[in-house]
Image (cartoon, rainbow, N blue to C red):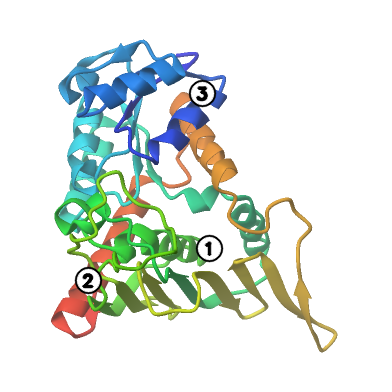
Amino acid sequence: MNRLRVCVIGTGSISNMHFQSYANNPNVILYGVYDYSKERALEKAEQYGIRNVYDTLEEVFNDPNVDAVSICTWNNTHAEISIGALKGGKHVLVEKPLSMTVEEALKVEEATRKYNKTFQVGFVRRFATNTKVLKSFIDNGKLGEIYYAKASCLRRLGNPGGWFADKERSGGGPLIDLGVHVIDICWYLMGRPKVKSISGNTYNQLGNRGNVENLSFYKAADYDKEKNTVEDLANALITFENGASLFVDVSFTLHAKKDEIQVKLFGTKGGAELEPELVLISEEKDTILNIQPQIDHLTFDFSNAFQNEIDSFVTSCLSGTKPIAPVEDGVEIMKILAGIYEASEKKCEVTF
């Protein structure tokens, strides 16, 4: 197989990054597209010169000319489509989160092993320039043992509505949409430790605040300001078996002065801030130093990170190398997300 023939499943907003990144990769043929809306699929096919527009998912799974799929659909379809594609002999890249439940995630992991195909979860922040630079310092021992991390991704107004605000389709609100990214990047940089216990809270106090005027924000194609069944805010304290801990808080809407994102890690030899800008904190000759690497992208470089993610997936498919974001990592992050929701519902600590 000289070039990877890819079919993109789902043509929502995030699919644009997949289509463009595949189009930029010389080792890829954008072979097909599927969406439950044939009209939208045809639009993407025309835009990117794609010859094959499928009427059903089964046609995609059964086409021997499709080597790999990118799944860009609602969260509640990720597991089912992933397993169907694996059974059909396809490599799979699925947008985060891996699934809606831990049980679904484990089934996807089992299918990945059974059918022996490349499977990558869309943890795109792992592929950002600032992440890769920081990880190189961490791997070289610059921070020592990382024992605490803190992550925030707070929107004052930013419930996208539509399927994002429908728990039946999304599985949750800011925790599963935004929290999945910041939790994963902290966990990844901390060395992927095993979870020991979780305490968490979710709040449904403000709704989607569709009444607010004069301030714009991203809205899903099916946005409806009256409909919302997901949380406004979630926070959690996650403790790991090695004694390290992670505190996280995320919101779609909050009475806050401004939106903010922060990712911080603290180790025995130094610390780091990944967001809002990469900086390393060190101590030398009894003096504390704040060190800012001289790189093009100190903060999350969305388009470049996506290109790196797609390129990495393509390389894994063609060479057989293990993905940077494998299925087992998707399972572990799903356990954390589910644990936070469970801890909030039961109003007690959840242990593993």
Identified by mark 2, the residue type is Tyr
Task: Determine whether, in the image, residue 142 is placed left or right of residue 51.
Answer: right
Depth order, front residue of 85/151: 151
Residue at the bottom extreme? 286
Depth order, front residue of 338/139: 338
Q: Quadrant of residue 217?
A: bottom left
Identified by mark 3, the residue type is Ala
Give percent across and percent down for residue 197. 29, 78
Task: Check residue 23 in the rendering and tell me which mark sits there, or answer none.
Answer: 3
Residue at mark 3 to residue at mark 1: CA–CA distance: 30 Å
Q: Nearer the viewer, mark 2 or mark 1?
A: 2
Q: Nearer the viewer, mark 2 or mark 3?
A: 3
Does dot 3 land on a helix, a strand or a loop? helix
Give percent across and percent down for residue 86. 25, 30
Task: Determine whether, in the image, residue 317 is placed left or right of residue 311.
Answer: left
Tell me which numbered mark, 3 or 1, is placed earlier along the sequence: 3
Tell me which numbered mark, 2 or 3, is placed earlier along the sequence: 3
Give percent across and percent down for residue 57. 19, 25
Verify CB contact (< 8 Å) between mark 2 and mark 3: no
Residue with the mark numbered 2: 341
Q: Quadrant of residue 55?
A: top left
Task: Check residue 189 in the rendering and tell me which mark sits there, or answer none.
Answer: 1
Q: Residue at x 49, y 70 (%)?
A: 259
Q: Quadrant of residue 156?
A: bottom left
Identified by mark 1, the residue type is Leu
In the picture shown, does residue 208 fall above or below 84?
below
